[in-house]
Image (spheres, helix red, strand yellow):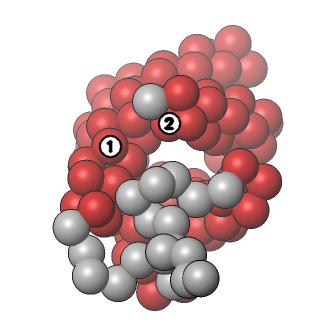
Amino acid sequence: MTRRVVQAVLYEALAVAFVAPVLVILFGRSPGSTMALTLAMSLIALAWNYGFNALFERWEVHQAVKGRSWRRRVAHGILFEGGLALILVPFMALWLGVGLWEALLADIGILLFFLVYTVVFTWSFDRVFGLPLAAARPKTS
């Protein structure tokens, strides 16, 4: 649990640092409004990150092949970002007063950034902190 909390908080803190300035440019809104939107999106994403990774690791425990290949990491990133988009696009549409289609179009660049960011972040996090027990390769003697 501690590992998941550290991962989620670090992930979101870096994400806010990258995304907040971009939202000001993309949406042409005030820095205060986009910062509030970014923080709200971050809190939503933080909850999603924790829940999704708990489910992913629960699934991982039951897999015959241990470890996190690039294929598994890409699948993780796509599933994570796809689920998050289903939550955030309507939220952004409501916040910005635009339709779902407009919110999705506005969010595509951010979604693409986060797809790459998620894969790179989780790889980097695993390199620094090690794999969770669910994904650790069995040691051979």
Report which residue position mark 2 lands on: 4
Tell which of 19 and 138 is nearer to you.
138
Image vertical order of residue 70 relative to residue 134, above or below = below
Residue at 66%, 66% in the rendered image: 123
The one nearer the camera, 2 or 21, is 2
The image quadrant that residue 66 belongs to is bottom left
Q: Which quadrant, please, contains the N terminus? A: top left
Rate crowding at label 2 as few (under 14), some (14 to 19) or many (20 or more) other CA atoms within 10 Å: some
Q: Earlier in the sequence, mark 1 or mark 2?
A: 2
- The residues tagged by marks 1 and 2 sit, at their Cα atoms, a distance apart of 8 Å
The residue that label 1 is drawn on is: 54
Mark 2: which secondary structure?
A: helix
* Tags 1 and 2 touching, CB below 8 Å: yes
Q: Amino acid at mark 2?
A: Arg
Residue at 34% over, 54% down: 57
Residue kind at label 1, given as amino acid type? Ala
User: Quadrant of the rendered structure where residue 90 is?
Assistant: top left
Q: Position of residue 56 (x, y in %)?
A: 31, 56
**Left-right relation of 79 to 73:** left
Nearer to the camera, 13 or 36: 13
Examine the rendering and report whether any part of residue 60 can be seen: yes
Can you tell which quarter of the image residue 80 is in?
A: bottom left
In the image, taking residue 8 as reference, residue 50 lies left or right, namely: left
The residue depicted at 21 percent of the width and 67 percent of the height is 62
Label 1 residue SS: helix
Other residues around mark 1 within 10 Å, as few (<14) / some (14–19) / many (≥20): some
Residue 24 is situated, as x and y percent measured from the top left of the image, at 72, 34
